[in-house]
Image (spheres, rainbow, N blue to C red):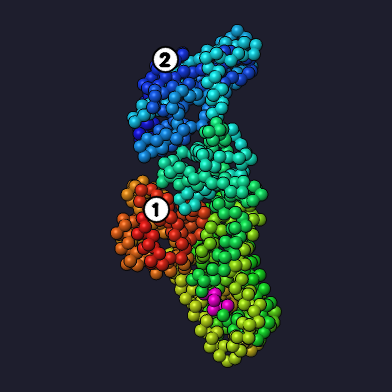
Amino acid sequence: MNRSLCLFWLAMASLMASTALAWERGVVHRDHIEVELVAATTSVQPGGTVEIGLRLVPDPHWHTYWKNPGDSGLPTRLNWTLPEGASVSDIAWPYPEALAMGHLINYGYEGEHLLPVTLTVGEDVAPGDELTLRVAADWLVCEEVCIPGDAQLELVLPVNSDRPSPHPDHADLFEQSRQQHPRTVAWPAGFSIEGGQLSVQIEPDVDLPIDTLEVFVAADNFVEHAEFASVTGSNGQVLIAQALSAFRSGSPDTLPIVLVDREGERAWRLTAEPGALVSDGSLLAAGSQTGWLLAIVLALVGGILLNLMPCVFPVLSIKAMSLVSGAGHDQRGHGLAYTAGVLLSFGLLAGVLLALRAGGEAIGWGFQLQSPWFVGILVYVLFALGLSLSGLFDFGTRLMGMGQGLTEKSGLSGSFFTGILACVVASPCTAPFMGTALGVAVLMPWPMAMAVFLALGFGLALPMLALSFSPALARRMPRPGPWMDTFKQAMAFPLYLAVVWLLWVLARQTDANGMAAVLTGMVVLAFALWLGARRDKGPSLAIARHVTVGLSLVLAVAALGTANRFQHEPGEGPASAWWENYSPERLSELRADPEQAVLVNMTADWCVTCLVNERVALNTDAVRQAMADNGVVYVKGDWTRRDPAITEYLAEYGRNGVPLYVLYPHNGDQARVLPQVLTPSLVVQALERL
């Protein structure tokens, strides 16, 4: 039965009942159910407590619902009217049964059952008084059809100074309800949502029956109830996996879960935090099932693979110059300096990211390139380095450690600077294994998170560090000579291509006015660098030159400020005839159709890996035809500018950066996360397996 329709009928029933205010005592009969307000004892004491509850007895094969009703239905609701000074607790829900209704699974109760609460009596009542308790109850009772019902129930309890006696008719029912109430436990438990699946890791202090354990997630519309949870055990831990609901919106701060051992008539209620457990049982505030040590390993491998990503190509020219220029020299110091530059940069970048995340900012890996300010600065830096390699000025000869300066202190400074630049240029990328590690890290305690980010940086620096410590490589490198000048100038062109790419990113973040401002700033910067390399014939000219250079640099920075003024807010970009813009609402609408498959591509203009994947894999005739043949809607989310909705979506899959490719099959089957590096055949095969 449609839940909205259920709510409507319950509201109408409550409205009609409230107008009559016909309070009824004893057993009340309604369609296919009888209800009664009962107490565990025959009296109450002043200031004491007593269990009272709603007794429900549906007809055979009919049922009512638990607080999470499952795929359909509504939980029973109690609205109390109490004497002054009295109060009641929330319902102590007994653990439910999984009830099949066609292809749906509901959570509820068949047969006689009790929804108990604890009543606290005020101190101002006196022995001999009577306590009148009233409750407006409404429920949904279902078999193949569902019937909303309600009643205005009343119970009168005498006040007595003596200890209350168990009620002869209802004491056993309350005792049975206590046995069916899950025991609240504080077991370490963490949960994550990734790849369309809920994963829960628990470290219980009792032996749980893994093969027969039933799992009930108390959060409504969070998991696919018809796909029962799988339960496994390992090393004293229980691992639970269940498909996420297609109608889920967001992720809860905590996740209440009920575990039921029906054979042993035991049940436990626990609360899982967003995170994972490590071997000592301590909880990491992480967003993935990956443990801390595994996250470090993944980050290290991801950092090594980051050297192969297109994002890092622009800095390879500087690395190549460093290796070639150092032939015949001990390069271990330069490898260590380069590694130090990478680690320092990753540490600073991670610190800023974690601080902003802790302050509530919805940002992720590569966030700095969502700012026109930062993109403009990076344009200036790479443009200046390109001009240096082209020979416009002598800045790079010592700073980047070329020629004879390699063995000097300035050479080490150049290696350190190259490490910084490698981090800056590589940061927009997400290499294989890296996405999961960063998804864990951004929600870990900061010392652990920082260790993961530093492992990622060390992985990026490791190949260069290993080469610098390799005597065999040094012997194989060609000796420095006049040919190096030509090689140096050739290595400027990858940097110029990187500048073109960044200018394109900037154009997507601002408009033509912003682009013109940055291009003007580049001309002014080139003039300042050219003028700064000139030699003066007198002190007056030197002063004038320095002043002019200083003013030019100020004007270049001012041009960046002007460009930033033309920044526009994130919004829908121009959609194509064969793909749609992402929005949470549109994705939910598509996934609500069981016959519709969806491919989601989370991308950004500053992510070169994303652009390469689109060029060589997604934007191909073979993939387009496969989408058409298999009825797949292609949805793109643009994270070039900050978009909290996309940041939240990435977090749902344990990711903190782009690219992310998620394929939702037909019939609401479990979503599949595709690799971060795509090929046409890989995508076509995934589409054909729908």
Q: Is residue 628 left or right of residue 561?
A: left
225 versus 134 height, above or below? below
Tell me where residue 4 appears, x and y as whole percent.
Answer: 37, 35
Q: Which residue is mark 1?
A: 664
Q: Is residue 505 left or right of residue 205?
A: left
Residue in the picture at 48% in, 43% down: 229
Answer yes or no: is residue 622 visible. yes
For badge 1, the amino acid type reads: Tyr
Find the magenta span and give its range.
314-319
645 versus 383 height, above or below? above
Q: Are marks 1 and 2 in contact (CB under 8 Å)?
A: no
Tell me where residue 371 appears, x and y as whole percent.
Answer: 51, 62
User: Could you tell me which quadrant the N terminus lies in?
Assistant: top left
Tell me where residue 618 appears, x and y as whole percent.
Answer: 38, 64
Of mark 1 and mark 2, the one earlier in the sequence is 2
Residue in the picture at 40% in, 33% down: 73
Q: Which residue is mark 2?
A: 22
Q: Residues within 10 Å of mark 2 (few under 14, many from 20)?
A: few
Q: Residues within 10 Å of mark 1 (few under 14, many from 20)?
A: many
Q: Is residue 7 left or right of residue 387?
A: left
Answer yes or no: is residue 558 visible. no
For badge 2, the amino acid type reads: Ala
Tell me where residue 247 appears, x and y as whole percent.
Answer: 41, 44
Report the front residue among 418 and 430: 430
Tell me, yes or no, whether the highlighted magenta stretch contains residue 318: yes
Report the front residue among 65 and 447: 65
Q: Is residue 322 left or right of residue 676?
A: right
Tell me, yes or no, whether the highlighted magenta stretch contains residue 400: no
